[in-house]
Amino acid sequence: MNINDKIYGTVEVSEPVLLEILNGPSLERLKDIDQFGYFTPYAQERHFSRFEHSVGVFLLLQKYGASLEEQVAGLIHDVSHSAFSHCVDYVLAASRAEKQEHQDSIFDTFVRRSELPAILEKRGFETGNVLDDSRHPLKETQLPDLCADRIDYTLRDICLSGEREIALSFLDKLSAENGRWIFMDYTSAREFAERYAYLNKTYWAGVTTAAMFYTVGEYLKHALSKAYILENDLYTTDTHVLAKIAKHHSYDTELMLLYDKMNNRIPFKNDPTNYDAIVKCKSRAINPLCRYEKSIKRVSEVDPAWLDVIERESKPKVFYLKFER
């Protein structure tokens, strides 16, 4: 099987466990789940699927020599995402929007109830080992460290900005050593960290993203309250959920107003003195490792002022949204 990826190029996959997972229902579902949340005028230029990103994490790990078990862990790391990705953190009462942790909180249970354990065990893998992030430091670490997940979605967003060559240049400057991602020089590490901060502030935790999270969340909550959809529907796909709800547009005026809002047809502003809703967004910052003067240091060890950026950008962003109607 050949995979054609916008970052890693054409890669042949022959490992049976990877092929079986790639062709199974858990990964197939991710093809119709938008990475950003909702393919809408809020975010047209930021569009790619959870499937594309999941495959990218696997390919990145493979490129840098991670174990097959860690590659598998990277490939399945997003299978528990609901339709509309982190928008659902603004729907379910048990979720905290500023943490965006719903997917992580259900991941273990979700995987164990899927087809994946049977595939893993048939191919000689322990499901518990695959799900144990402590065994896979290249795939997943705590912020502000780098991990394959953060590297891949950052590179994809850089590509979406029309800068694929810059994205590829970062790959040339990275190494994976003893479970750590290390840039070959401080300049590359600092530039990557700054681009990550820019993408976070402008897109991932920006005001238009806050509006998307809130409006899609309100639309889905209304649909759930009216039983147009059930909570189980949230674990299908974006297209399936939208199609079920759309049947009720013609007679539910409140639903249509919410639909217009989530499609950016009703102007809004961010005004802390006059608002309809307070919306919190998870915010992120990274502190990469790099080679510097014959040792390995974090960006903040070379420039202590970077700690101020990490402290500021690691706090949830808060927006005060006022819609014209």
Image (tube, rainbow, N blue to C red):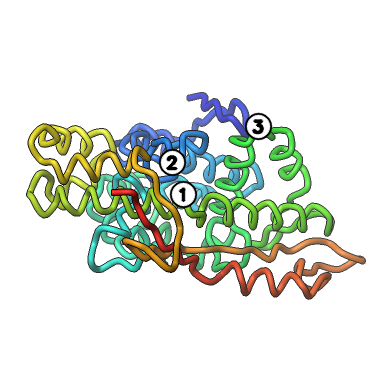
Q: Position of residue 46 (x, y in %)?
A: 51, 38
| 28 w.r.t. 71: above or below | above
Specify the amino acid type for callout 3: Gly
Q: Nearer the viewer, residue 281 or 192?
A: 281
**Distance of mark 1 from mark 3, alpha carbons?**
20 Å
Category of crowding for the residue at label 1, using alpha-carbon neighbours closer than 10 angstroms: few (below 14), some (14–19), many (at least 20): many
Category of crowding for the residue at label 3, using alpha-carbon neighbours closer than 10 angstroms: few (below 14), some (14–19), many (at least 20): few
| 73 w.r.t. 47: above or below | below
Q: Nearer the viewer, residue 285 or 114?
A: 285
Q: Residue at x 46, y 34 (%)?
A: 44
Nearest to N terminus: mark 3 or mark 2: 2
Residue 143 placement, left or right of 55:
right
Give the mark toward the camera: 1 or 3.
1
The local secondary structure at tag 1 comes to helix
Q: Position of residue 72 (x, y in %)?
A: 46, 47
Q: Residue at x 23, y 41 (%)?
A: 236
Mark sitting on residue 162 = 3
The local secondary structure at tag 2 comes to loop
Residue 80 visible in the snapshot:
no
In the rendered structure, are the residues bearing label 2 and label 1 in contact, judged by CB atoms less than 8 Å apart? yes
Mark sitting on residue 208 = 1
**Distance of mark 3 from mark 2, alpha carbons?**
18 Å
Q: Position of residue 148 (x, y in %)?
A: 58, 52
The local secondary structure at tag 3 comes to loop
Mark sitting on residue 42 = 2
Specify the amino acid type for callout 2: Tyr
In the current view of this chain or complex, which residue is farthest to the right? 293
